[in-house]
Image (tube, helix red, strand yellow):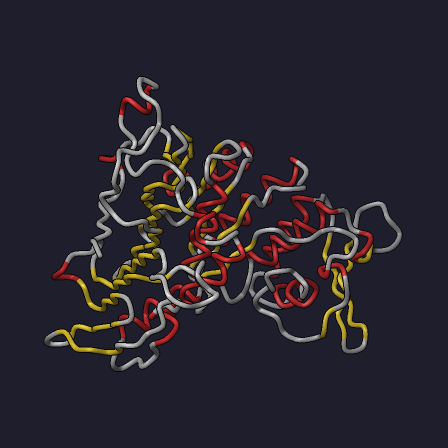
Amino acid sequence: MIQTVAVRGFRSLHDLVLPMGRVTLVTGANGVGKSSLYKALGLIGDAANGALVSSLARQGGFGSVLWAGPENISAAMRSGEMPVQGKGKRVNPISLGLGFVADDLGYLADIGLPIPRDTMFVHDPEIKREVIFAGPVMRPASTLVRRKNSRVEARQDRWELVLEDLPNQMSMLSELAEPTMYPELVAVRQEVRNWRFYDSFRTDPASPARGLHVNTWTPVLAADGSDLAAALQTILESAFGEVLDSAVAEAFPRGQVVVSDVGTRLELRFRQHGLLRPLKGEELSDGTLRFLLLAAALLSPRPPRLLVLNEPETSLHPQMIPALARLVAEASKRTQVVVVSHSTALVEGLRSLLGEELEHHELIKDTGETLVAGRGVLDRPVWDWGSR
């Protein structure tokens, strides 16, 4: 289970370190940094899949995602006694930091500005440092694998050179794969590659989730929900079929999901009390379709190590929120869940179901920086970024 997540220098996340629970709920007003946290988690996943630099480019480029405030914010700046401004020359290099600690191992990456060279790709950032460490905090004695620029070393009885020409745009998580030589690195990569993210499901008339899908066992819902019919049928035939039926009946009294076999294709249908025939996928309301997509994601027979949902309550009628909360609680029995949400009803529902097992972070913004309401620096987990 992920114990801690740390982000530095990414949009409004100047230096954020969060403890994580079996279910972590992140709330706050618009613009406080909830989506930035969601995207930061996604960047860690992109690093493990060799797509970190391209993902940053799609978000507007490295310069657009960096913290835009001063290197340090003084108490006088926060109180308004003096203007928010830099204090001359920087002490530390410009850096975007990403990291996490799981049960046994931790990982951090330090991404920085490229070294000037004769290339058209002058805006691509470079991975300056990566570290895999044991225990809750990175320390020299707990470091197991380290990367500085293009050079990677692993600790055996002593430090041994693993690679000296790793491309600066590629993470060592994606490039080194020998399990017997680098078991800790492989373990971290497998951990991160097993994270699953669901954000903006399309529910418009042309949504791929409304159409037919090839008839095949589908234990994991696609990121765009295009295989919804197959994913729901897979759940219905699994040990979680009754949970799905109960969730649908709670959200839509006496409603029922039905998947029809149309040759080599599967078609989603939905029985609604009072109607003489089931509704087809293209006839479902946006809210109904979105709830079914969320149910398919949360009840996967092959759960991920970490499931991250961004604003799942979007388009849902308030009467569906208790059923959604129950699905999240059910999913947390088999996987760790992070939910980013605006919904007060979802907060109340999860708190009622999970009690102290719920890790709730309300984000606020102070002088442009994302902070956790009611928590100071001494209340957060210990974290050390190290130095270049």
Q: Which residue is located at x 47 percent, y 36 percent?
A: 27
Pick the front one: 54 or 108 = 54
Looking at the rendered image, the quarter that the N terminus falls into is bottom left
Q: Is residue 375 left or right of residue 121?
A: left
Residue 1 seen by the camera:
no
Q: Is residue 175 above or below residue 42?
A: below
Q: Which residue is located at x 24 percent, y 47 percent?
A: 92
Seen as rendered, the residue at the extreme right is 276
Q: Position of residue 179 (x, y in %)?
A: 30, 80
Seen as rendered, the residue at the extreme top is 81
Pick the front one: 287 or 374 = 374
Q: Is residue 377 left or right of residue 33?
A: left
Q: Position of residue 278 (x, y in %)?
A: 83, 55
Q: Is residue 297 above or below residue 365?
A: below
Q: Position of residue 342 (x, y in %)?
A: 54, 36
Q: Which residue is located at x 35 percent, y 41 percent?
A: 14
Q: Is residue 10 above or below residue 46?
A: above
Q: Position of residue 317 (x, y in %)?
A: 68, 38
Pick the front one: 43 or 58 = 58
Looking at the rendered image, the quarter that the C terminus falls into is bottom left
Residue 89 seen by the camera:
yes
Across the whole image, how many numbered discs are drawn on residues? 0
